[in-house]
């Protein structure tokens, strides 16, 4: 069956329908990872977005147990070619069946390079995937212009707290849409990790007397998370060590008076170089974000820039002055992507043990 991807600027790509055949409107973003398509599909930070994979062949090792959450989150999926014969010793099924099962509409067989060039030059924009050959641009384009995603954190967070047992430090992980490997990375280092819903109050977290607090990644515009930001401000006031990733990093900055802004087309992929400003070392990082902290709005008495993106100079991390708090925009938990910055979990362990 034919499918059409219609962009807000009126461009139309014609391809083949994959997954669900329902109509979908979403923000279209591109990811440059060469593998790890399952981790991308199950990363809750993609809620409210449709993902274009720039790597031309997707699904060649099928469905494997590499899920970063219980389900797939993107609104839509856009690929050049889907593998018809996946092959891997861990393969449990095809991506075609997975997309159908998860009710995610998609389109295959389009020139994803041309599409990515449009998004890179004009910036991220909204789009629609439809199988209706009689689509009417006059009706659709105003809908695309008007579309906004709204509050998505409440859709992806867990409903009840749950625990990963461990004999080491007790970590309270705030789930704004956490990827599984954040809790796993801490648990692997011995931590007892309690995962809390995003609307848990600071008082409740503090009362549980954690040795450390972890603020997770998550979807949407950080500025819309006003209630969570207010709770994070109270967590900042304590002496509890805090480590934050991606959305968590942005929310901690907002809680301390800094501003965030939307990047033209975001950073999504597995090879983004970031520089650690304490030793000028460059690490290759996994990234997935559309917003960034505006470094010029950070109060130098509160925090200093700890990492910058080598490609475009945007902020990639902050270290809070006089506090055991550090935050990064990239993903030390990888999944998918390089594990170069996994040492940051060790730094957090040292903080919790009082070494820093
Ligand atoms: N992966 C994330 O946590 C993304 C944070 C935020 N939603 C952004 O797009 O910038």
Image: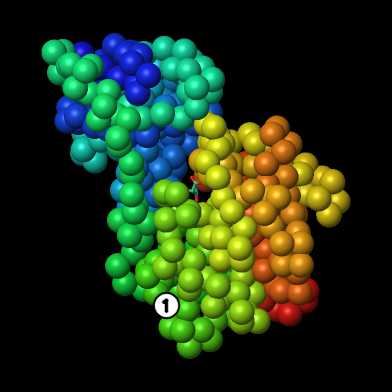
Residue 183 in the image: above or below residue 279: below
Q: Name the foreground residue: 42 vs 226.
A: 226
Residue 101 in the image: above or below residue 162: above
Image location (x, y in percent) of residue 17: 23, 20
Q: Residue at x 25, y 35 (%)?
A: 104
Residue 43 in the image: above or below residue 185: above
Image location (x, y in percent) of residue 147: 30, 37
Q: Residue at x 67, y 54 (%)?
A: 297
Q: Is residue 10 left or right of residue 294?
A: left
Image location (x, y in percent) of residue 56: 46, 18
According to the image, label 1 marks what residue? 201
Rendered-image quadrant of the N terminus: top left
Rendered-image quadrant of the C terminus: bottom right
Based on the displayed image, in which of its 4 quarters is residue 274 positioned?
top right
Kind of element beneath mark 1: loop
Based on the displayed image, in which of its 4 quarters is residue 136 positioned?
top left
Visible in this render: residue 86?
no
Based on the displayed image, in which of its 4 quarters is residue 233 positioned?
bottom right
Image location (x, y in percent) of residue 155: 30, 56
Q: Residue at x 69, y 34 (%)?
A: 312
Q: Residue at x 47, y 13 (%)?
A: 114
Q: Is residue 35 left or right of residue 326?
A: left
């Amino acid at each position: 069956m034919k499918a059409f991807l219609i962009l807000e600027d009126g461009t139309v790509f014609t391809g083949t329908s994959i997954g669900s055949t329902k109509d979908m409107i979403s923000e279209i973003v591109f990811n440059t990872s060469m593998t790890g398509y399952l981790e991308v599909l199950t990363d809750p930070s993609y809620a409210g977005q449709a993902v274009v994979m720039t790597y031309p062949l997707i699904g060649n090792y099928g469905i494997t147990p590499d899920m970063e959450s219980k389900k797939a989150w993107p609104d839509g999926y856009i690929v050049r070619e889907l593998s018809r014969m996946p092959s891997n010793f861990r393969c449990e099924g095809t991506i075609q069946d997975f997309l159908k099962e998860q009710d995610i509409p998609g389109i295959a067989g389009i020139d994803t390079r041309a599409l990515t060039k449009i998004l890179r030059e004009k910036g991220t924009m909204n789009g629609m995937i439809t199988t209706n050959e009689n689509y009417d641009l006059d009706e659709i384009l105003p809908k695309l212009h008007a579309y906004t995603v709204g509050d998505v954190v409440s859709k992806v967070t867990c409903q009840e707290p749950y625990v990963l047992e461990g004999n080491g430090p007790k970590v309270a992980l705030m789930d704004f849409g956490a990827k599984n490997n954040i809790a796993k990375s801490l648990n692997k280092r011995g931590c007892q990790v309690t995962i809390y819903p995003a609307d848990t109050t600071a008082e409740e977290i503090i009362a549980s007397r954690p040795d450390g607090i972890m603020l997770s990644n998550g979807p949407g515009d950080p500025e819309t998370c006003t209630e969570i930001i207010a709770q994070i401000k109270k967590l900042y006031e304590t002496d509890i060590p805090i480590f934050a990733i991606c959305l968590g990093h942005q929310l901690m900055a907002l809680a301390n008076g800094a501003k965030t802004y939307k990047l033209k087309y975001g950073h999504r992929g597995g090879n983004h170089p970031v520089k650690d400003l304490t030793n000028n070392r460059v690490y290759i990082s996994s990234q997935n974000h559309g917003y960034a902290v505006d470094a010029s709005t950070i109060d130098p008495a509160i925090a200093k820039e700890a990492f910058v993106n080598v490609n475009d100079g945007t902020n990639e991390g902050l270290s809070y002055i006089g506090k055991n708090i550090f935050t990064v925009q990239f993903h030390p938990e990888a999944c998918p992507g390089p594990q170069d910055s996994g040492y940051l979990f060790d730094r957090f362990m040292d903080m919790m043990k009082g070494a820093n």
